[in-house]
Amino acid sequence: MSFERNIKIAPSILSADFADFGREIRAIEDQGADWVHVDVMDGHFVPNLTFGPPAVAAFRRHVKTVMDVHLMIAPVDPYIQAFADAGADFITAHLEAGPHIHRTLQAIRAAGAKAGLALNPGTPVEAAAPLLDMVDLVCLMTVNPGFGGQKFIHCQVDQCKRLREMIGDRPIHIEIDGGVDPETAPLVAAAGADVLVAGSAVFRGGSVDAPEIYGRNIEAIRAAAEGAL
Ligand code: DX5
Ligand code: ZN
């Protein structure tokens, strides 16, 4: 996987039909998804529960692009190897999930995955400065993590600009997660983000029987983002 800063759309399967993940994943990839975003929640770090390593391993069999696993769990370290073995390309952990994010990022790379660092809206992006040589991706949350379908938090756009300046020439993706749609995508694309996670704005109105709606939704977000560059 070579590094590119072009716009990538990463549908979050949190908004998919939970009884039909295989077909949902194939549908979004056929319809132009660049990455597949998998939201792992533990009912402790965030007030919602989703899926663990065996489910993620089952998703992997359907993912042909890039499997981007967002861990909203605490502690993180005991589960890193299991998510790497499940086939995650990127494993993203929250800075707020524990006292030893540096160790966590080391462990992710040691397990053979690309390392992502997620920051909640209440965390200054400057907190990522000492970690930039250890990460392949920084995920800026534009909602408080836990649920799909929440409202985009606008003050994160300025944080995104500051993060983009901090990153400079390093091959680090900036991912935006939460409330991304054709209205908000241009704001974060102009601020330097390249990976746009979108759950409700991709799955809205479509289904595995009407996948072309997923395609239209993905292209609307992509066109809006690219139009801002
Ligand atoms: C939120 C998750 C997001 C979520 C995005 O905790 O990390 O990935 O699924 O959903 P939308 O795009 O609906 O805000
Ligand atoms: Zn996410």
Image (cartoon, rainbow, N blue to C red):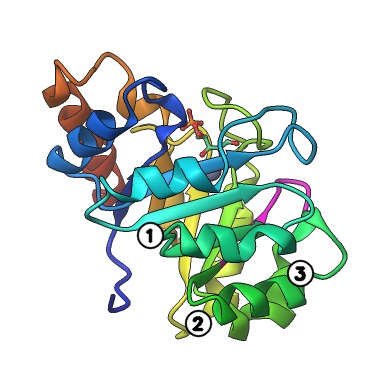
Q: Quick one: SS at disc 2?
A: loop
Q: Position of residue 139 (x, y in %)?
A: 56, 57
Where 102 sits versus 59, above or below?
A: below
Front of the two marks 3 and 1 = 3
Q: Quick one: SS at disc 3?
A: helix
Question: Which badge, 1 or 2, comes first in the chain's sequence?
Answer: 2
Q: Residue 30, which numbered label?
A: none
Residues at discs 3 and 1 in contact (Cβ within 8 Å): no
Q: Which residue is mark 3?
A: 101
Q: Quick one: SS at disc 1?
A: loop
- Left or right of 20 on screen, residue 162: right
Q: Residue at x 42, y 22 (%)?
A: 18
- Left or right of 35 on screen, residue 80: right
Quarter placement of the N terminus: bottom left
Give the spatial CA distance, label 3 vs label 2: 22 Å
Q: Which residue is mark 1?
A: 194
Q: Is residue 228 visible?
A: no
Q: Is residue 31 visible?
A: yes
Q: Residue 168, which numbered label?
A: 2
Front of the two marks 3 and 2 = 3
Question: Which badge, 3 or 2, comes first in the chain's sequence?
Answer: 3
Amino acid marked by disc 3: Ile
Residue segment shown in magenta: 116-123
Question: Which badge, 3 or 1, comes first in the chain's sequence?
Answer: 3
Amino acid marked by disc 2: Gly
Quarter placement of the C terminus: bottom left
Question: Does 23 appear in magenta?
Answer: no
